[in-house]
Each structure stands twice: as structure tokens, then as C-alpha cells.
Image: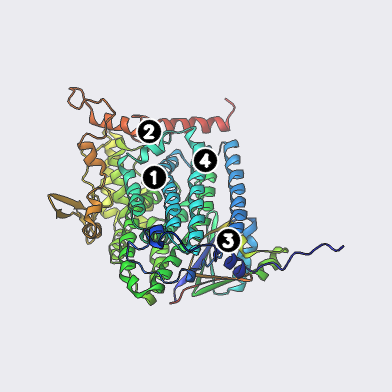
Amino acid sequence: MDTKTAGRKLGLKEKYAHMTRGLGWDTTYQPKEKVFPFEQMEGIKIHDWDKWEDPFRLTMDAYWKYQAEKERKLYAIIDAFAQNNGHLNVTDARYINVLKLFLTGVSPLEYMAHRGFAHVGRQFSGVGPRVACQMQALDELRHSQTQIHAISNYNKHYNGMHDFRHMHDRVWYLSVPKSFFDDAVSAGPFEFMVAIGFSFEYVLTNLLFVPFMSGAAYNGDMGTVTFGFSAQSDEARHMTLGLEVIKFILEQDPANLPIVQKWIDKWSWRGIRVLTLVAMMMDYMLPKRVMSWKESWEIYFEQNAGALFKDLARYGITVPECVTTATKEKDHLSHQAWSTFYQYGAAAAFHTWMPSPDEMDWLSAKYPDTFDKHYRPRFEYWREQEAAGNRFYNKTLPMLCQVCQIPMLFTEPDDPTKIAYRETQYKEDKYHFCSDHCQHIFEDEPEKYVQAWLPVHQIYQGNCFPEGTDPTAPDFDPLAAVLQWYHIEFGADNLAFEGSEDEKNFAMWRGMATQNS
Amino acid sequence: MSKVFIAFQLNDDTRSIIEAILADNPHAVLNEAPAMVKIDAEGSLTIHRSSIEALLGRDFDLQELHLNLISLSGNIDETDDEFTLAWAN
């Protein structure tokens, strides 16, 4: 008897149709709007969910196959990294501080993205987007896990990474990325998709995962570049999903346009503000630099997002106003952010330093219009003070923006010598903002943003000390109490890089790695 | 016209993929960076399965691109034989 031959292999389009259509069902004993209660709440009108199509046409069987292979590759490298003391191959120990910021600030967002996509996948009644959300929820969980695994090899040897999840919910600068995601997951499902799928994935992750990860490779960090690129290979799919969401919503009903435009305006700015941290990572925290923040911004935002907005113009979408502000800020952002972290280096879970003279020359060359004029004099003064034993630590807590939660460190878009302050009176209270754009976001949804958990306000209200602390005791030290509550160990995790335990250990271990005594 | 791009990890698997893309898209520009390459192209970029197979000397499924893909931009149109990135304007 002849062996039965398998039927013709399905083409990509056919397979996708089979595995994403006809999988849903209509409700019988409950009205549909009660089963999908969030689908209507934002005013978005969807007439035909079947018009949704994933351009990659990725189906679950192919998804598992390729993701498994990505994981095998990644973990082979992480094992090799650990077995060969890969941490000693990085350019210098200052580099490791960027991983502390990444682990405490970014990895928990991956987990929140996992939860967010699992949630909206349940809330959409269309099968195509549900499948796509399910895959993305799994990807995000993978990213969070692989980042924690990869960086755990550094945690064995260096300070500041021991309690990243605890810190994420408490430490002042981590409230910036945390509040971004909290804002997105507490919105409706369509706004979440625009916030994360579009603004975060399409417009912004390119800046974090592409030039920054290439920078990790340039600095000898094999583990990080590998998890970064492995994650970004999923992001390519997420970006596509993000763009697809926008096109799909806009094509479904012309009434959706103003709602989507408002979300694009809001989330572009929310994302741009979070990128402040990435700007300083690239210009100040990578000992060997691939490209400046400004250059990355020009390639991945001006050129790439510019092309995207031009493409979306056919639906009536216009470039958000905030892009003009962000374009003016590109020459200042990283310098203003790093000088803030330098001043508040006693309250951070990573070390800070002033750039060396040749690093300052690099900054002058990359920022010819601003660095020498506005930032070099201040940085040279701080270097001199540090050399004289007067390392400057700012002990006054800054005002935070009610929306992005960043200290009010940004200058007026057209005057780099003047800090930008905006304020709005709402009911009994006055609220402060770093920019017109954060102010507009607040004014559109004040009841949401009055609830913001602002770290500085919370410290002043006495909510950030370990239980049993007596703030009226004569020897009460507020900074020490806050650091204890953060789980930041004074003298080990914080303060200057020069003289830190990390610096000493790295030098000693690298010495041991090349000598026998 | 706007530019589209596609970026890959730099490794043994991608060498033939990159070579095939550049051969099929003479207007594309290769930008090299540590551990990665970024291919930029005005307007659109098309990847042909057959060109990659000819260089690799084996069957290739275009979805294997996912393994080493870092990022891309443009609207995607993918079939079994071709993968195209393009902007509408």
C-alpha cells in the first residue's frame, strides 16, 4: 500500500486566514457589549474586524518555532558570557551603570506591557488583533525574563541591581517610566494600543534598542547586545502591529480621526519625555560612543517617524505639535538630564561622574551649538570642585512635572538659559508642568493626573520612610530614611563612580584575569 | 519619497541575506554599525526568497528573517516569495 502523501503545503496567506479567522464566536445568552465592555467606552467605531490583517501573517505555529530558536541562540550566548567572565570585557566599569538603569527602569515596563497586551487581547472582539495581542503579550514576558536573566550575571558582581522591582515602584526617577506605563494600562484598549503599539514601539523603541544596543556591543557587552537585539526582533513585529492598528482604526470610520490624532499627540510627547533617560545613557553613560543622542534622534525620529507621519497624512493625521519642541531640545536634552543625575547622585541606585576632558571634546564636536556655550563651563567647574574634595550633591528636592514626573529641569524651547515652568489651577490646587505639552495632557484629563503619585510630594508628606521612622527625632536624617525605604545602600549603590566599590572591584578582577598573582 | 529601512544582526546567517537585498535593490544603501547593519532605501525595498536561496544554497522561508531582524520601517507586504517595505508618500 502506498504511503499517503501529505496535502499541498498552505501558502502564507491561506495559513494566516485559517488560523486567524472563524475562531471567534457570537454571544448567545449575554449581549456582546457586556462581554466586551471596554470596546465602546472610548468612542472608537469599528465596523468590520475582519479587515484587520497582520502584514507579517505570523501564525501561532510559526511563532513558537521562531521564538524557540531565538531563545536557544540567546541563552547559548548568555551561558558563554557567564562562563567566560564576560562582565570583565566591558570597556570600563562606568558602563555597568547603564545596565542598572535599564534593569530598574525598562525591564519592569516589559512586564507591564505583557500584562497590558494580555488585557487588551481579551477586550477586543476581533480575532486578528486578539491573536496579535496574544503573541505580543508572550513576547513582552520573554523580554522581561531574558533581561532579568542576562543582567543577573552583573548583579553577582556589582552594586545597585539587587532589588530592581522594589525600586521601580518607589525611586524618584523610576516613576518617570513607571508612570508612562501606568498611564497607558489605565486607559481604554484602543488608547493602550496607540500608546504602546504605536508611539512606544513604532516611534520610540528604535532609539533604545537599536543605537543603544549597538553601543552595548561597542562597549564589549555581549550579553546585553544579544538580549537587546533578540527583543528588538520582536519589536519589529510590534511596530508593524502598531502601525497596522492606526491604519485599521482610521480606515474603519472617519469619526475616529480626531480621537486617534489626540492620542498620537499625547503619546508622542509622553514617549519623548521618557527618552530623556535614553539620551543621557547614549551621550554620557557609554564609555565608547557609537553616535550621539542627537544623531540617533535625527535618524530614528526625524527621518523615520517623519516618513511615517507623511504616510499617515492620507488619513488626515498631522505631525504632533510637540515634535517642534522636541527638535529644539535635541541639542540640550542629554546634558540637562545628566547634570541633574550628577547633582542627585546621592539619591540614585547607580553611580554618576563628570565626563573626562576628551569626552567633553567629543560632546563639543557633536553639539557645536550648545555644549561649550551652556554646559562645558558648569561641568568643568564641577570637575574642579570634585578634585578639590567638594563633590557637589544637591540636597534640595526638585519640583516634579505633574504629568511626566521628571524634575523641572528642561529649559524654554527658545531660551536655554531659562527653566520652563507652566502651571494650571484645578479645583483647590495648583499643578506644575515642564512644558506646554504636559500641561495640555493634564488639562484634557485632569481627574486622571491629579491622582499622580509624585515621589517628591510623597517624601515631603512622610510616605517614603521605613515603617516606624520618627521624623521628629533629633537625629532624623531624611535622605538616609528615604534611601533605606528605596533599598539603596548608602555608599555602595549611590554617590560618585570614582572611589566606588564597583570601580575598585572591576580594576582588581580585571587585573586578576590577566595575571597569575 | 521617504526612506524605508531594514536592520539585521551581523552574523553568518545574515551575510547572504544582506548580499541578496543589496543585489536586488541597487538603490539601497548599506550602513554598518557595531554588531548590526541598516539598509536604507528611497521609497521601497523588496526581498526575494529566490535570491537568498541562490546565495545560501538551501531552501529559505522568508519568515526566517524574524530570527535576525532588528528593526524596520515602512508598510509591509509579505508573501511566500517576496517581502516588500514601502511608504505611501
Q: From the viewer's perspective, is A440 left or right of A323?
A: left
At x 54%, y 44%, the residue is A223
* Residue A254 sits above or below residue A86 on the image: below
Judged from this view, the residue extending furthest toward the left is A428
Image coords of residue A363 (percent x, y): 36, 53
Callout 4: chain? A
Residue carrying label 1? A105
At x 35%, y 63%, the residue is A40
Total marks shown come to: 4
Residue carrying label 2? A493
Task: State the SS at label 4.
Answer: helix
Image coords of residue B17 (percent x, y): 62, 64
Residue A149, disc:
4
Task: State the SS at label 3.
Answer: loop
* Residue A497 sits above or below residue A295 on the image: above
Q: Which of A376 and A411 lies nearest the eye of the viewer? A: A411
Q: Earlier in the sequence, mark 2 or mark 4?
A: 4
Task: State the SS at label 1.
Answer: helix
